[in-house]
Amino acid sequence: MLISEVITRKIEAHHLAREACLYVRQSSLRQVMENTESARRQYGLRHRAMALGWPAESVRVIDEDQGKSAASSANRSGFRDLMARIAAGEVGIVLGLEVSRPARDNADWHQLLRIAGIARTPILDESGVYDPNDGNDRLLFGFKGTMSEFELQGIGARLVGGRKSAAARGVLKMALPIGLAYNDGDEVVFDPDQSVADAIRGVFDRFRRMGSAMAVVKWMHRENIVLPSRPRRGPNRGRLRWALPSFSQVRQILRNPRYAARSSTAAHAASRGRTAR
C-alpha cells in the first residue's frame, strides 16, 4: 500500500468536519528572531492540512507559545488551549513539525496522546500522519517522545559542561545583576552609569536603616523613587528601564551575593589604598 493511501485511510469525514490545529513553537525569543527557517517550515504545515482536505479557514494556528520552552506546560497557554480543544472534540487533526514542538516532557506528551486517542484525533508531523489508537503508531510516537526528552537532557548537560569548562579555565562570564558590569579586563565592577550604581547602593543604605525589605519598598513608593532594570528577554532586552520597585525586585537585590562580593572587594581595595597613603 502506498504511503499516501495509508495517510488517506487515517483521515475520515468526521476529522474533516472539525478544525485542523497547527501548533507552532520555538524555545526562545532569540530563536524566533534568528531561526526564521524553522518558523517557515512550521507555518508551512498548514498547506499539508489543506492538501488532506481541510479548507484554509478551518486551519487554526496556535502560536502564542513562541519563545517558550517545551520542558513544561505550566507557562504555555497555547499548549493548554490545544489540549482543551482536543478534549472538547473540536480538533480533527493536530499538526506540528516534530514531537518536540508540543512537548519535551514525557508526561505532557503522553497526556496529549491519551486525550487525542479518546477524541480519535490523528497527529501529523513532518514525517507523516499517526493514529494515537493504532498500536504501532503509538509505539513510534512514544519512542519519539522519549528521544525528545532525552535530547532536552542532553542540551542541559552540554550547557552545564560548557560552563564548568569555562570556569576551570577562569573565563566563565555569568550574567550580572543590574548595577554591576564587566570592565575591559573582564573584572566585575560597578555599573559605569553612576545613576544605576547609586540607585542600587541606595537600596542597601535604606535597608540598613530600616531593617526590612517591605519598609524599603513602601518608602520608595512614598518618595516616588524608581529603580533601574535591564530585561534579559523580549524586545527590550538589555535596555535600561526605570520604574517604581516591587517587593520581589528589592528582595532579590538584597539577597543577591554578587552585590555583597563586589562591595567587599571595593571595601578591601579602599582599605589598601588608605594604608598605602
Image (cartoon, helix red, strand yellow):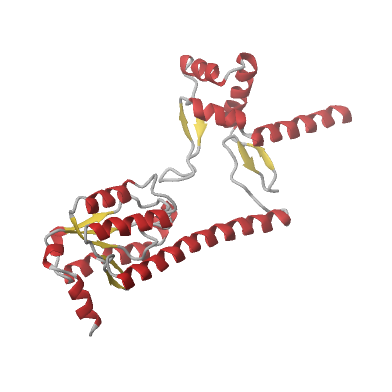
Quarter of the N terminus within the rendering: bottom left
Where residue 166 appears, as percent x and y from the top left, is: 67, 56
Residue drawn at (75%, 35%) of the image: 265
Where residue 55 appears, as percent x and y from the top left, is: 12, 64
Where residue 252 appears, as percent x and y from the top left, is: 56, 31
Where residue 264 appears, as percent x and y from the top left, is: 74, 32
Residue drawn at (68%, 48%) of the image: 186
Q: Nearer the viewer, residue 8 or 223?
A: 8
Left/right of residue 254 with respect to residue 59 in the rendered view: right
Residue drawn at (39%, 44%) of the image: 75
Left/right of residue 146 with respect to residue 155 in the rendered view: left
In this view, the residue farthest toward the bottom is 1
Left/right of residue 268 with respect to residue 7 in the rendered view: right
Residue 271 vertical position relative to residue 118 in the rendered view, above or below: above
Residue 198 vertical position relative to residue 5 in the rendered view, above or below: above
Residue 237 vertical position relative to residue 165 in the rendered view, above or below: above
**Visible in this render: residue 126?**
no
In this view, the residue farthest toward the front is 135
Q: Nearer the viewer, residue 185 or 161?
A: 161
**Visible in this render: residue 39?**
yes
Quarter of the C terminus within the rendering: top right
| Residue 145, image quadrant | bottom left
Residue drawn at (20%, 67%) of the image: 49
Left/right of residue 208 with respect to residue 1 in the rendered view: right
> How many numbered marks appear?
0
Q: Nearer the viewer, residue 8 or 63?
A: 8
